[in-house]
Amino acid sequence: MIGQIFDAKELTQKLKATVQRTGKLGFTSETLEALHIQQGTHIRIAEDTESKRILWMGVLQEPADNAFPVNKAGDYYYVNTTRLFEKIGLDFKKKNCMFDMSRFPDYDALIGGVCYKMQLRVTDRRQVETPETEAVRHGCVGD
């Protein structure tokens, strides 16, 4: 007997959010579409009780207590989370900080919106080569 047919579109989406050097949380266009994020959307963020590498995000279509408004600059949507990420000790100025996201409908009521688990991924930032850093790297800087 055939059971549930899996939704390939839902299961192949790569939902991601990136913390910019400024501490703002930005979203990929695929994530914006999947989460229905637009101007007027609000985001509620909660810590995980067991892991510092997990946050929980609730997407709300109306303002709510303890929710961040989504801002828009051109085609770019972001949440001003600088103080939040400083508070939890995220080194977004020196590291690339990204969140892989997955839907958790069982927690919608707890977070008060459409709930997503945000799994932190951190990598080293690539150095932007300038004439000064190139000279230092090649040992061309005089005393």
Image (tube, rainbow, N blue to C red):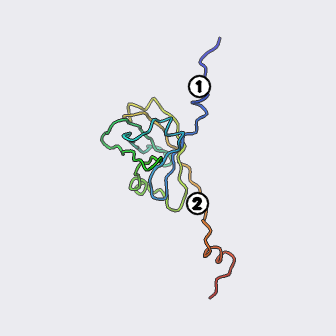
Residue 114: x and y in percent read 42, 33
Q: Which residue is at the front of the view, 86 or 7? A: 7
> What is the number of callouts on the image?
2
Type of the residue with mark 1: Asp
**What crowding class fits label 2: few (fewer than 14 Cα within 10 Å), some (14-19), or many (20 or more)?**
few
Residue 9 position by quadrant: top right
Residue at x-position 65% and y-position 11%? 1
Q: Is residue 23 above or below residue 11?
A: below
- Decide if residue 124 is on the left or right side of residue 69: right
Residue 94: x and y in percent read 53, 62
Residue at x-position 56% and y-position 53%? 122
**What crowding class fits label 1: few (fewer than 14 Cα within 10 Å), some (14-19), or many (20 or more)?**
few
- Decide if residue 116 is on the left or right side of residue 12: left
Question: Which residue is outermost to the right?
Answer: 138
Residue at x-position 49% and y-position 52%? 19
Residue 34: x and y in percent read 50, 35
Q: In this view, does 107 lie above or below 132?
A: above
Which quarter shows the C terminus? bottom right
- Decide if residue 120 is on the left or right side of residue 69: right
Residue 107's disc is none
Question: Which residue is outermost to the front?
Answer: 74
Q: Which residue is at the front of the view, 137 or 122? A: 137
The residue singled out by tag 1 in the image is: 7
| Secondary structure under the numbered disc 1 in the rendered image | loop
Question: How far apart are the alpha carbons under marks 1 and 2?
Answer: 35 Å
Residue 142 position by quadrant: bottom right
The residue singled out by tag 2 in the image is: 125
